[in-house]
Image: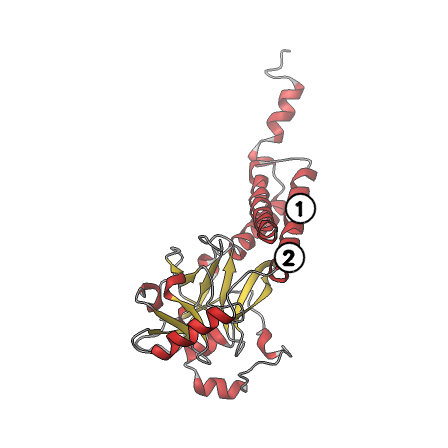
Amino acid sequence: MIRPFSVKGEKDRQRYQFGTADPNKLVIIATVTILFLASAGVHGFLLVPKAIQVSRGHVDFIRKTPFDATSHLAATTKSRPVEKTDQEWQQILTPDQYYVLRKEGTETPGASELNYVKEPGTFVCAGCGAPLFVTDAKFDSGTGWPSFFAPISSSAIDLDTDFKLLLPRTECSCSQCGGHLGHVFEDGPEPTGQRYCMNGVAMKFFSDQERPDLVERVKQLQINDPFRLSPSQLLPGAVVNGIISAFFVGSFLSSQQTTPIEYLTLLPALYYGFVSAKNIAKML
C-alpha cells in the first residue's frame, strides 16, 4: 500500500494541525493572552460596568475589573502631606471621584470631557488640588483616556508596580494624597516614550487664564524639580518585565507539540521583552 505522505510528513502535519491542541492548554493560553492584553492597556473589553450616581459633567458609570482587590491605599503606611480618613474623602469627593481616587476604579473610555481639552492650562488632582500635568504634555492616544507623556515634575506623582491583573502594570498616583490616577505604559511619544493613561474624573483642569497662580507654581516646580526618569524607577520594571518575557519564551520553546494557537505566547514575550529593553536603554 502506498502512503500519501511520509511518516515525517505526517508528524509535521500533526505538529501544526490546529485540532491537536490540548483543550486545557488552550484555556491557559487564552487566559494568559487576555491578562497580557489587559496589563498592556488594551483592557476596555475586560471591564465590568458598575452603576453609580449619574450627574451632569461626570462620567456615566464606572467600570471595575473583575480582578480588583482591596485598595492598597488603606494598607499603605507611607506618610503623605494630605491625609484624610475614608469618611472624610467620601464627604469631599463625588461618588465618581471617590471610586477612582480612593478605590482604584476605572472610568469608561471616552467618558471624560478632559479628553478634548487643548487650551493651555494645568491638570490638578481632584482630591487635593496638587498640579500633575500641563496641556503641553497632553496627546491623543486614541485610548479614550486623557494621556500625557510626562508629569510636570519628578515629585508630582508616585509610581508603583500593580499586579492586580497578575501581570505587572505601573500604577500612577498623586504624591500628595495617594489618590489613584491611572497607569503608565511604554508606548508614548518622545521625549519620554511613555503614556500616562489617566482617569479624567481623578483630575480637574484649570486654564492659564482661570488660575494664573497655578502657572507660576508649575514654572517653579519645573525649574526646581524637573521631570526625569531615574534608574530607581526604571530598573524594577526592566527586571520584572525581562523575567516575564523569558518565562513566555521558555514556555514556548519547551512545548513538545506546537499548534498555531500556542504562538500567541510569543505576543506577551515580545511585548515584555520590548518594555524591558526600552527601560534598560533609558538607563544608559
Mark number, residue 152? none
Q: Residue at x 54, y 87 (%)?
A: 85
**Mark 2 vs 1, N-terminal side:** 2
| Residue 194, image x, y percentages | 49, 56
Residue 23 occupies quadrant:
top right
> SS for tag 2?
helix
Q: Nearer the viewer, residue 60 or 122?
A: 122
User: What secondary structure is marked by label 1?
Assistant: helix
Q: Position of residue 266 (x, y in %)?
A: 58, 42
Residue that mark 2 sits on: 235
Q: Is residue 243 left or right of residue 204?
A: right
Q: CA distance from mark 2 to mark 1?
A: 16 Å
Q: Residue at x 51, y 63 (%)?
A: 183
User: Residue 147 location, x and y as percent?
Assistant: 42, 61
For this view, does 205 lie left or right of residue 22? left
Q: Which residue is mark 1?
A: 246
Q: Amino acid at mark 1?
A: Ala
